[in-house]
Amino acid sequence: MDTLEIALLLFSALAGASSVPPPAPVPWRGSSIDSFHTYVLTDRLYRDGKAREGKVEDYARMDDGWIALTFNNESVFRYNPDMRLLRSDLVQFFQMPAGGRLLFMASIKRDSPDFYDARVYQVFFTELKMFEVYVDASDASAPRWIFRVQREERWSRPLEPGRGCNFGVLCDGAAGTVSLFFSEDDEPLELSSVSGVSATIESKPEVHWGPLIYDAGGATLEHSETFMYSGVGVTDRLALRGSP
């Protein structure tokens, strides 16, 4: 099953049960998708102190205007412990179709004992703090994952050392909600929190897919084969459960 087939299956799941199949994809490849009003920037990534470029590998346009994006990078990034703050944005989505839905998804594997030496490690965040998913390790004996919507904590979970984590954040412009999906290791993503938002989601949320690290002490991040879609995001081994 290729990534576009996966996208269509997940699109159908997100859209709810229906006897009407989703529209067939229209394959499309190119260096720019500006004409589709969804902008993707790949900022510089860092590996051993050297800048590297991320890669958006594939594009597809759905008949109804949805854009499917495949982003893949299997590098390991190391952060300079002498820097108080280092931000490396892998993907930024700057505009959402009015009333549409976007799901941002990430899979993270912990491969270093000092992975969470940082006091705060953000996986997803927005410039206007519409939502954030991050680790609070200010209490080193009890680090935890936290989900905040418009600066208010809506969900938390103890961080279990040695286990990988998967996240999905679904922004629904029509419903005015932000939903968090979470799982560990290879388990399917489960709906964990749904929160209403007072601001319109489609007003340029400037969503970043981490990391934003404070007080980093040689932290290491590895991510691989993460497929991101406008409307659907999934890896080849994950599915969504409990989608609103």
Image (cartoon, helix red, strand yellow):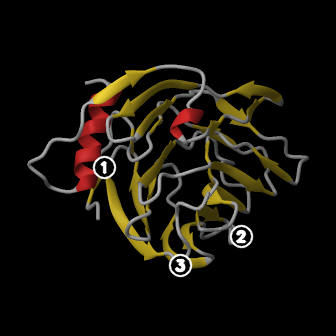
1 or 2: mark nearer the eye: 1
Q: Position of residue 63 (x, y in %)?
A: 32, 35
| Element type at mark 3 | loop
In the rendered view, would you say 23 is above or below 199? above
Quadrant in the picture for the N terminus: top left
Mark 1 element type: loop
Above/below status of 3 relative to 16 = above
Point 60% across, 68% down: residue = 130
- The disc labelled 3 sits on which kind of residue? Ser
Look at mark 3 in the image and give the residue it sits on.
198
Foreground: disc 3 or disc 1:
3
**N-terminal of the two: label 1 or label 2?**
2
Task: Determine the CA span between mark 3 and mark 1.
Answer: 30 Å
Q: Residue at x 64, y 46 (%)?
A: 113
User: Pointer 2: what residue?
Assistant: 138
Q: Earlier in the sequence, mark 2 or mark 3?
A: 2
Q: Is residue 162 visible?
A: yes
Q: Determine the residue located farthest toward the right in the rendered image.
A: 82
Quadrant containing the C terminus is bottom left
Residue 132: x and y in percent read 59, 64
Q: Is residue 176 left or right of residue 113?
A: left
Task: Name the residue that disc number 1 marks.
Answer: 188
